[in-house]
Image: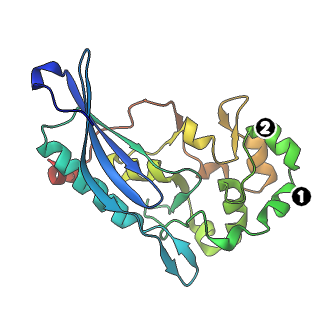
Amino acid sequence: MTTTPPSSAFASAFAAVDLGATSGRVIVGRVGPDNLDLTEVHRFPNTPVRLPDGLRWDVLALFQGTLDGLREAARSGGVASVGVDTWAVDYGLLDADGALLGHPFHYRDGRTDGTATRAWAKVGAEELYGITGLQHLPFNTIFQLVAGTDTAQHAAARTLLLIPDLLIHWLTGSIGAEETNASTTGLFDARTGTWSKDLLSRLSLDPGLFPPLRAPGDPAGTLLPHVAAYTG
């Protein structure tokens, strides 16, 4: 972290919401022709919760921490835009009204034990790697979805949003999936840069769950009025 030069040295300020496995933080970056100043304006814990059906993320607490951090960012002088970054593979499911169907599962939850074998019976491991280019990890999104296929939650789901896209949805109301994060799911075709319709079909996953893709840095939308009012 640098000493802040006079404000005239900077053209713009930007907020970065960075959520990790044990904590979250909001950073304000002030960018000038020859300067970059980074200031942590808010930090908050990320504490998973063990529920009767498994290990879950407390995503509401994370969103509140994000809002509080953006309010601190505004107090520090205002920002031109906000970017959101989190860990990969985990997701939230929305129903037909856009409401979240329960707290997202934690990637360390044990419900995916043995699920890879079920998926490989439909798409071999070597073929899967050829399509996605993704390292096999037992908690990849593809295996989480296979594990939940027969649940009431999945039956009610109409939209899947990865964690950063879920937070962006709550901030702006927009629905989408950023491509580099989508590539961690095991359902993204690295050759075409799109969701793999073939994989979705063979694994009996509803293509309608998966939102439109957007490129890194593409604007997702503007803050919803109540978010803007809270954060300033």
Q: Are marks 2 and 1 in contact (CB under 8 Å)?
A: no
> Is 67 or 219 nearer to us in this picture?
67
State the SS at label 1. loop
Can residue 117 be seen by looking at this rendering?
A: yes
Can residue 228 be seen by looking at this rendering?
A: no
Residue 99: give x, y in percent of width and height. 43, 64
State the SS at label 2. helix
Q: How many marks?
A: 2
Residue 94: give x, y in percent of width and height. 49, 61
Quadrant for the N terminus in the image = top left
Check disc 1 and give the amino acid type: Ala
Residue 228: give x, y in percent of width and height. 19, 47
> Is 160 or 98 nearer to us in this picture?
160
Label 2 Cα neighbours within 10 Å, binned few <14 / some 14-19 / many ≥20: some
Where is mark 2, residue-wise?
131
Where is mark 1, residue-wise?
121
Side of 150 relative to 102 (left or right): right
The numbered mark, 2 or 1, whose residue comes first in the sequence reads 1
Image point (56%, 50%), residue name: 88
Image point (43%, 29%), residue name: 218
The residue furthest bottom is: 52
The picture quadrant where one finds residue 113 is bottom right
Image point (57%, 67%), residue name: 156
The circle drawn on residue 59 is none
Label 1 Cα neighbours within 10 Å, binned few <14 / some 14-19 / many ≥20: few
